[in-house]
Amino acid sequence: MKHYHTIYTINYICYSLLYRSQYPIASNEWHRVRVSRTARLAFLTVDDQDTQTQMSQGAFDELTANQNMYLGGVPTFRLVSPYIPVRKAFKGCIQKVRSET
């Protein structure tokens, strides 16, 4: 989160896509966050806010994830693209994570 917005990023080789929740969210409350990607289109939905979408560049629909996926933080921010404006890890609880391939 940055300024209490939920931030979702996808790091590609040459660039990064950043998605930000439409509105700030309140801390110390439970929230429902859903992220997904279909072909080149990625989605971020937070609570009842409008879904934020973005299309990735290029012609390829598939995503090859040969690196780790981090949720809430990273071991060191040297792993994060300098184009991503977040430099603090998430602090809080995550109740449920579901991953589909």
Image (cartoon, rainbow, N blue to C red):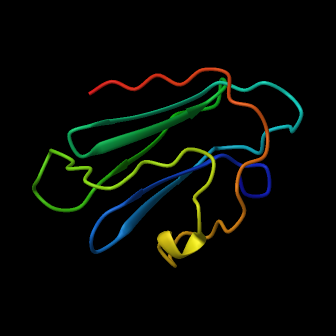
Q: Could you tell whether 79 is left or right of 27 in the image?
A: left
> Against 64, is 52 above or below?
above
Which one is in front, 74 or 16? 74
Q: What residue is shown at x 53% (from left), y 76% (from top)?
A: 78
Res 36 quadrant in image: top left
Q: Could you tell whether 27 is left or right of 33 in the image?
A: right
Of all residues shown, which one is farthest toward the right?
A: 28
Question: Residue 47: horizontal and vertical position, in percent?
Answer: 67, 25
Question: Residue 30: horizontal and vertical position, in percent?
Answer: 78, 24
Q: Could you tell whether 1 is left or right of 66 in the image?
A: right
Q: What residue is shown at x 46% (from left), y 22% (from top)?
A: 98
Question: Residue 10: horizontal and vertical position, in percent?
Answer: 40, 55
Of all residues shown, which one is farthest toward the front?
A: 75
Q: Quadrant of the C terminus?
A: top left
Which one is in front, 45 or 1? 1
Question: Residue 20: horizontal and vertical position, in percent?
Answer: 59, 51
Q: What residue is shown at x 28% (from left), y 75% (from top)?
A: 14
Res 28 quadrant in image: top right
